[in-house]
Image: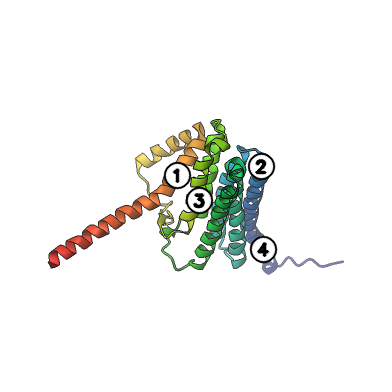
Amino acid sequence: MEHLDNTPAVEEKRRRRSIYILPSLFTTANLFAGFYAIVQSMNGNFEHAPLAIFIAMILDALDGRIARMTHTESDFGAQYDSLVDMISFGLAPALIIYEWALAGMGNLGWLAAFIFTAGAGLRLARFNTQVGVADKRFFRGLPSPAAAALVAGFVWVLHVNGVPGKEISIAALVVTVLAGVLMVSNIRYRSFKDVNLRGRVSFMTILALPLVFVLLFQDPPRVLFLTFLAYATSGPVATLFRRRREDREHAKKQHHKA
């Protein structure tokens, strides 16, 4: 009869193996959401396709958090997550907006979609090479999930309001190209990684949270699109104000020297 080894060391090894699998399951679910978004866009379902992108964003946030909570970060997990992000936040959004609005524009349409996809790939590669070096408080360039949410949200909010993609193809092209360019730009975006979720919050913050959920459930497409549009524009606006402040300080120094 085969002897089963149930020693504490073996049990601990099995437990650790199961914990390592857990983040990968969320990453695989992220991959499924991205693949599902591509299939739905090919079928002309422009309600479910953008929604799948936002679900992929939630799963992408969870896999990393679970890996950190269980102390199971690994090079394999990081590489797998990056490859999946390329599909869910690089390829899928580009195909969604291409099928919805850009397909009828000929070479300009697929070129705009490619610019977005290439921007996502370059953004992810740059992020991987800067891990542990860059300031964690800021992202360099628009994060690919936020860019994907901007493009997918644009399609979702207009589609549910009955606006055909062919009638707004120029605006779709502009949004797609700008999102791709912002990803590879040097513009800084807040990462919110320095926010302490375990710390104390004000009473007004507690009151504001239910209001946010009410607004979200009242009109998810519009609220999500406007949220990520505001985030996408926050980087250039903050950069403009920072440069103006630096120019004024430089002018004051030059004035004092004179």
Judge whether residue 28 can be spotted in this image: yes
Disc on res. 229? 1
Residue type at the position of mark 2: Gln
CA neighbours of label 3 inside 10 A, class few (<14), some (14 to 19), many (20+): some
First along the sequence among labels 3 and 2: 2
Name the secondary structure under disc 1.
helix
Front disc: 3 or 1 = 3
Residue marked by disc 4:
17
SS label for mark 3: helix
Quadrant where the C terminus sits is: bottom left
Q: Position of residue 45 (x, y in %)?
A: 64, 38
What residue does disc 3 label? 177
At horizontal 34% and vertical 52% (from top left) the residue drawn is 238
On the image, which quarter does residue 227 sit in? top left
Q: CA distance from mark 3 to mark 2?
A: 23 Å
Query: What amino acid is found at the position of numbered circle 4 in the picture?
Result: Arg
